[in-house]
Image (spheres, helix red, strand yellow):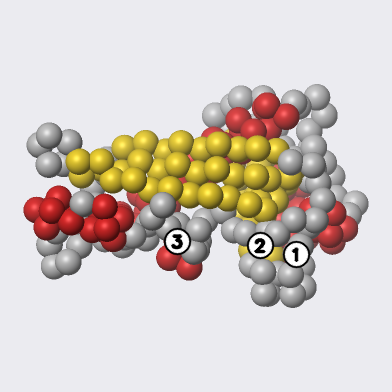
Amino acid sequence: MRTNSLSVKYFEVGRRTLTKVALLYMDDISDPEMVQTITKSIEAIDIDGIYGGNQFMGLIEGQPSLLFLVVIYDKKNKIKPFVDKNGKVRFDIKMKVKASVEMLIKGATRDQYEKEIKRAIKKEIKTTYQYTQKRDIDLFRLSEKLYRKDIKAWKKVETNGRIPLKEDTLRSIQIDVQIQDTGKHRLTPIFEGQRDKGWENQ
């Protein structure tokens, strides 16, 4: 199932819960019309909140299942600064995610799903960082992380109260994914930058 053509689309479902739903598909396998159909079905959902995988699937019942949908319902994040002997600052990101797969690909194993979800989340973090770094936006609050952990190092590199962000500022991204059985769980977004209280210095 490993392929370089893996693509992912993220949606926020529920006016109050803003539940993060990920649609993963293979560009070279999936029918574009099928992807568009499911995309429209998800975007058309108008409801206060999503509180479980079964509820979500009931809202898009009857859709084709050559893709797989992932609902993230629990996560823990940790961002740690690393300062090398030359004073260069970089960061390690670790994320633990629990998710349920709501639309299955025939023949795929739990391990394969976990690997593909891990790759998709890692790709999303990298893409988001690259986009914001080029626009001088510290979306991950890295300057704040360094300030709290090592104020001496922060003072050496900061400019106007912020540390400079480089293309290689993220040293590593480690994702741990656990596929859980579908059921009713407390749902939280994968990633919402500063609005996400899960991104805390632990």
Mark 2 or mark 3, which has the lower sequence index?
2
Q: What residue type is labelled 1?
A: Ile
Left or right, 47 with reference to 132: right
Residue 137, quarter of the rendered image: bottom left
Q: Nearer the viewer, residue 80 or 167?
A: 80
- Within 10 Å of disc 3 (Cα), the crowding (few <14, some 14-19, many 20+) is some
Q: Helix, strand, or loop for circle 1?
A: loop
Q: What residue type is labelled 2?
A: Thr
Task: Name the residue beneath numbered marker 2.
Answer: 19
> On screen, 49 above or below 76?
below
Q: Distance between the residues labelled 2 and 3?
A: 14 Å
Q: Do the residues labelled 1 and 2 touch (CB within 8 Å)?
A: yes
Q: Distance between the residues labelled 1 and 2?
A: 6 Å
- Within 10 Å of disc 2 (Cα), the crowding (few <14, some 14-19, many 20+) is many
Q: What residue type is labelled 3?
A: Gly
Residue 114, quarter of the rendered image: top right
Task: Name the residue beneath numbered marker 1.
Answer: 50
- Within 10 Å of disc 1 (Cα), the crowding (few <14, some 14-19, many 20+) is many
Q: Position of residue 119 (x, y in %)?
A: 54, 35
Mark 1 or mark 3, which has the lower sequence index?
1
* Residue depicted at x 49% and y 64%: 197
Q: Position of residue 124 (x, y in %)?
A: 49, 47
Task: Name the residue beneath numbered marker 3.
Answer: 193
* Residue depicted at x 20% and y 44%: 89
